[in-house]
Amino acid sequence: MEILADMSTYLGDEVSEQDNPVLLILINRAIRKVSSKRYPYGYTDTQKEAAVSKYRDTVFDAAVYYWAKQGSEGQSSHSENGISRGYQNEDDLYFDVVPMVKTL
């Protein structure tokens, strides 16, 4: 999977091949989220592939976000030993995904 290779390159020394199963879980989570935002009333495999193709960068950004936030799920900010971190809202990652709806 191309996104997996890009994530491994982007994260560099932070990851190894042993992390690939976790990275794939995070990538698939991002793919499901993009697909459900694009097709809020359900989607086919073909539609999922189209969404991944169109919003590949969003999938990548979301998967990296999920990797970076491991261990701090549910937190919006964190302070420890004089270091403060603030996390963006997860839904903000998907701002560019335009929903497709059908009319009756």
Image (cartoon, helix red, strand yellow):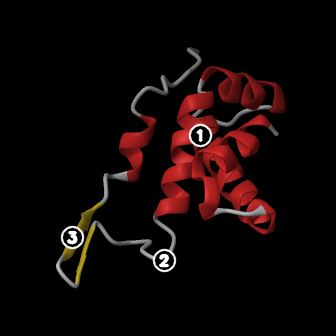
- In the image, what residue occupies the spot 53% across and 34% down? 58
* Label 1: how many Cα within 10 Å (few below 14, some 14–19, many 20+): many
- Left or right of 100: which side holds 44? right
The disc, 2 or 3, on the residue closer to the chain's N-terminal end is: 2
Q: Quadrant of residue 38?
A: top right
For the residues carrying marks 1 and 3, which lies nearer the camera in this image?
3
The residue shown at (40%, 51%) is 90
Q: Amino acid at mark 2?
A: Gly
Farthest residue in the front direction? Answer: 13
* Residue 73 sits above or below residue 38 on the image: below
For the residue carrying disc 2, how many other residues have a C-alpha within 10 Å: few (<14), some (14-19), or many (20+)? few
Please state which amino acid type lies under the numbered disc 3. Ser
Front residue of 16 and 76: 16
**Image depth: mark 2 or mark 3 in front:** 3
Which residue lies under the disc numbered 1?
Answer: 60
Q: Which comes sooner in the sequence, label 1 or label 3?
A: 1
Q: Quadrant of the N terminus?
A: top right
Disc 1 element: helix
- Mark 2 lies on residue: 71
Choose between 15 and 102: the one closer to the eye: 15
In-image side of 69 versus 100 (left or right): left
**Residue 84 numbered mark, or none:** 3
Measured Cα–Cα span from mark 2 to mark 3? 15 Å
State how far apart marks 1 and 3 are (Cα): 25 Å
Outermost residue, top side: 103
Residue 82: horizontal and vertical position, in percent?
17, 79
Query: Which SS class for mark 3?
Result: strand
Q: Earlier in the sequence, mark 1 or mark 2?
A: 1
The answer for how far apart the CA atoms under marks 1 and 2 are is 19 Å
